[in-house]
Amino acid sequence: MAKREIDDRFKKFGTVSFTSISKVNDFVDSLEQGKVMATRCPDCNISYFPPRVDCQNCLGSNNEWFDTTEKEGTLATFSKMKYGPVGFEDDLPYTIAVLDFGDFKMFGRIDNNVPDDSIKIGMKMRVHVNDLQADQKNFVFKPA
Ligand SMILES: [Zn+2]
């Protein structure tokens, strides 16, 4: 009886997936070190946030990590949330915003301690790692 070959094509998918997951885990490790990481393709000079493993321009995998907490962004837009999606009800009210760093943009929240009347489009802001309950982390924007 001839041995059946094992159909292992799926491992190619798994390998790619695990690589991808591992790089996402690097993002979480960096949060624990106070860094909010993005990636940049050195060949195309395109930056990605949320971080991308592969460059969507050249399809290469040379993307390098960099720390966005060292940079200053400009507040492009913001909105005060009085109703939130399921799971965020206890956080209300909170302010979502987009920071423009020039070569990339970042979507997130403005720190709750920033007074509403001090928030102005065009103001300079920085991203900071924020500690949540139960060892969870996210990031928030604060005035630069
Ligand atoms: Zn590229």
Image: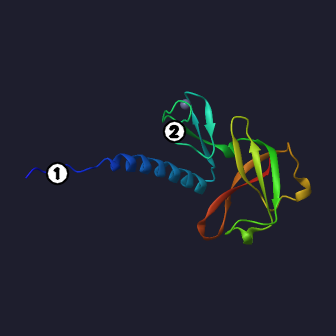
Which residue carries the number 2 mark? 54
Residue farthest to the right? 117
At 81% from the left edge and 45% from the top edge, which residue is drawn? Answer: 75
Secondary element under disc 2, as helix, strand or loop, is: loop
* Kind of residue at badge 1: Arg
Residue farthest to the front? 1
Viewer-nearest residue: 109 or 137: 109
Left or right: where 37 falls relative to 143: left
Please identify the quarter of the rendering in which residue 116 is found. bottom right
At 63% from the left edge and 50% from the top edge, which residue is drawn? Answer: 35
Please identify the quarter of the rendering in which residue 70 is found. top right
Which residue carries the number 1 mark? 4
Image color mode: rainbow
Q: Where in the figure is residue 140, as x and y percent of width and height?
A: 72, 55
* Kind of residue at badge 2: Asp
Q: Is mark 1 within 8 Å of ligand 1?
A: no
Residue farthest to the left? 1
